[in-house]
Amino acid sequence: MIESAIDNKAKQVVSNIRNLPTPPIVFHQIQKVINDPMVSAGQIAKILQEDPAMSVKVLKLTNSAFYGLSREIESVKQAVVIVGLEAIKNLVLSASVLDMFKGKDIDQEFQDKFWRHSLAVGFCARLLARRARARGMIDPDSAFSGGLLHDIGKVILCCFLPKEHAAVKEARETNAEMESFLLEEQVIGYNHSQIGNILAKQWKLPSRLSDAISYHHFPEACESDDLIPYIINVANYVAKDTFYDDDDRPMVGSVGEGVLEFLQIDEAALEVLSEDLREEYLKSETFMQMAGLA
């Protein structure tokens, strides 16, 4: 009952936000055809080419250290063939999200930390998706998008609900160790996961990404059997533990109870993951530029 009341309040808050960003038409066009087994690389490329700016971004990302390809990709069609349809869809989504919020000049320090952390979680989730195979295959590109978007509700608070954002930030000064979603509920009556979930539905994102946003704090509460909420829970912790400075250390938190056991990975694997994340994060320059951070 309490959770339903919080959800309703979050829905009301989001419905009152004017000029809420939406992904470009090209993302929804790709989303419509991506699950068609008969769709060709040429068809996807044709959709992308209708948005020249997005085509340039996809080529930049495909040729970046993120993929580490041995030869330069010169056309969107070539990119689709080499990295695959699912990867292209997730690249378009990632580029869209970074672009939608770039240039918002509210609390730049928060936004800088937010995007750096979100990218770190995305990179960590991608690494983890390649390794946590005991429970089944996980698409690394979907894991990256889930990591990038997991806290998207926080940037909505910052950019479109600045008074609420300021209130949570002020409360943080005397609640250094409280989980963000609990602090938000205490101060403003709803949390960033609920805002993100509503946004994901408005954007018509795939259910696995909506689940990553909604359940990254409590993956066991997710009704689907998708592994991405579990992956994001671990990646969120590792990214914080790896990169948070002394001021933010109290907010590192811990991995959800039973999550490591569920994924069949151990504490030692997290140390290796942290080391690899530092190296992987060096490849983030192209994404940083898109977010206006580099």
Image (cartoon, rainbow, N blue to C red):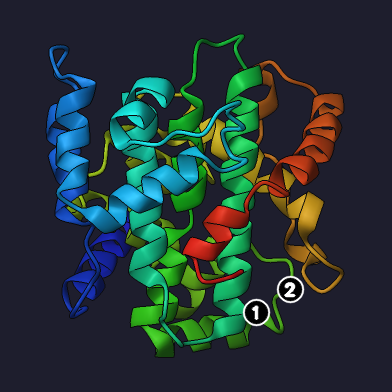
Circles 1 and 2: CB atoms closer than 8 Å = yes
Q: Which amino acid does label 1 sit on?
A: Arg
Q: Residue at x 62, y 41 (%)?
A: 65
Q: Position of residue 80 (x, y in %)?
A: 33, 28
Drawn side of residue 21 relative to residue 253, left or right? left
- Residue at (41% x, 80% y) in the render: 103
Disc 2 marks which residue?
Answer: 176
Real-space CA distance between mark 1 and mark 2, rounded to the nearest whole angstrom? 6 Å
Question: Which of the pair 7/84 is nearer the observer?
Answer: 84
Residue 62, how many percent across, how many down? 47, 38
> Image point 40% across, 75% down: which residue?
157
- Would you say residue 270 is visible in this rendering? yes
Residue 189 at least partly seen: no
Q: How crowded is mark 1: few (under 14 residues within 10 Å), some or many (20 or more)?
A: some
**Percent position of residue 117, x then y:** 63, 58
| Residue ID for mark 1 | 172
Say which amino acid is labelled 2. Ala
Q: Is mark 1 on a helix, strand or loop?
A: helix
The picture places residue 66, in percent across and down from the top left corner, at 59, 39
Viewer-nearest residue: 219 or 106: 106
Q: Quadrant of the N terminus?
A: bottom left
The relative height of residue 258 versus residue 20 in the rendered view (above or below) is above
Left or right: 293 as drawn, with respect to 249:
left
Check the image and report above or below for 114 versus 166: above
Task: Check disc 2 and report its element: helix, strand or loop.
Answer: loop
